Image (tube, rainbow, N blue to C red):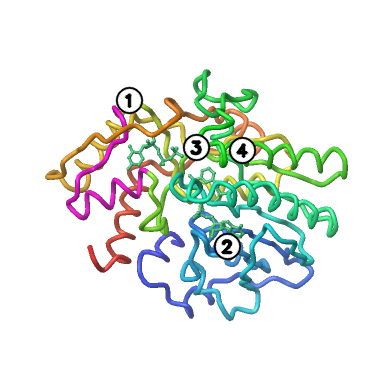
Amino acid sequence: DLRNLYLAPIDKQKIWAMVRKKARSQQKRVLVTGGAGFVGSHLVDRLMLMGEYVICIDNYFTGRRSNVEHWEGHPNFELVRHDVEYEYTAEVDQIYHLACPASPPHYQYNPIKTLKTSSLGTINMLELAKKVKARFLLTSTSEVYGDPEVHPQKEEYWGHVNPIGPRACYDEGKRVAETLTYAYHRHDNVDVRVARIFNTFGPRMNENDGRVVSNFILQALKNEPITIYGSGTQTRSFQYVHDLVDGLMALMNNEFKLPVNLGNPDEYTIAQFAEYIRNEINKNSIIKNLNATEDDPQRRQPDITRAKNEIHWQPAFTVKQGIQETVEYFKINLPSL
Ligand code: NAD
Ligand code: UDP
């Protein structure tokens, strides 16, 4: 079971022996931007095990070499330190464009850099796709719907985003990235895919990520107060990372070109979720309400009808399974716990 690979220190010999052997002519050359990050590194694992040739580029802003170091030295793997704000060229068949900080504290740390990553970075990757005739997949986000007025969110909904608020660098950055993607499709015939990803969690989330799932798990494990921002009535729907990777690959290898929501419709209020984590991990945890953050979306749940019909994908893991494995991961990998 591949999922157990990261639950103990990875045995490089063992994982290399699992790589499928493919003739050069059968092998795809795949570029993964942001491949040393949380989602990117799981995608790299899957592509490598399938026997593809993988080039991973990352500037290590929120990602870490250690997430992919078990592939360093493998003949099918290249790791390149590169910032997507600048041009990059390689002969590839597919581009998964993930590079962009995803957690609010990280994308708000330097909003101008976040905007450059989403705008210039996406232009650079689309130019590359155009030049080498690669298929291009953008990892967009449920944040393009902003603080939604419709529930659950379907892909046809145009969104409700504050263009000048603290979240705008990310939301509007991704909106322009989508606009660029379809502009290159219409004008230059680039073959494109767009995934709108809803809240995703799992092993390899950075200890300092700041998103709700890793914050709550780590707070409970460290016996620190579980921090709810605001009243906790706002909702989110959580998907386990392995479902997302399946969805990204299903979308990339399908002919459907319009945006597709990838998420698990299992919706919780943040207060319910805090209770749930307390019950699962540490019944002595205190739950503490802090100030609400500005423009925090109040409800979020994906309508995944399109994903089911067009790419034949739906989540297979429950939140409970995902939380158990993520807790396991943190216990093994954070010696301070
Ligand atoms: P992450 O922060 O762990 O990964 C992002 C990666 O991109 C990191 O390795 C980072 O170092 C790299 N990066 C950032 N700016 C870069 C730049 N200018 N040049 C090169 N590399 C750069 O986040 P993640 O959760 O793995 O998210 C991956 C993608 O999925 C992002 O595009 C994000 O917007 C999208 N997404 C994620 C979620 C989620 O819940 N995880 C939800 C919606 C969308
Ligand atoms: N949140 C919280 N406590 C935390 C971190 C986040 O209550 O320690 C809330 C946050 O205000 C939001 C939800 O949890 O309503 C999801 O936040 P996250 O940063 O994970 O992702 P978002 O969906 O907002 O991008």
Residue type, label 1: Thr
**In the image, which disc is placed on residue 44?**
2
Few, some or many C-alpha atoms within 10 Å of disc 1 (few <14, some 14-19, many ≥20)? some
State left or right for residue 118 relative to residue 304: right
Q: Position of residue 186 (x, y in %)?
A: 85, 37
Q: Of callouts 1 and 3, which one flags the residue occurring earlier in the amino acid sequence? A: 3
Q: Of callouts 4 and 2, which one flags the residue occurring earlier in the amino acid sequence? A: 2
Residue type, label 3: Pro
Do the numbered discs 1 and 4 sit on residues whose CB atoms are within 8 Å? no
Q: In which quarter of the image is residue 268?
A: top left
Q: What element carries label 4?
A: loop
Quadrant housing the C terminus: bottom left
Do the numbered discs 4 and 3 sit on residues whose CB atoms are within 8 Å? no
Query: Which residue sits at x=38%, y=41%?
Result: 318
Query: Which residue sits at x=56%, y=32%?
Result: 164
Ligand 2 shows up in which quadrant of the image?
Answer: top left
- Say which residue label 3 marks: 166
Do the numbered discs 2 and 1 sit on residues whose CB atoms are within 8 Å? no
> From the viewer's perspective, is the residue at label 1 or at label 3 nearer?
3
- Say which residue label 4 marks: 312
> Is 311 in front, or is 302?
302
Q: Give the range drawn in magenta.
A: 212-231
- Say which residue label 1 marks: 233
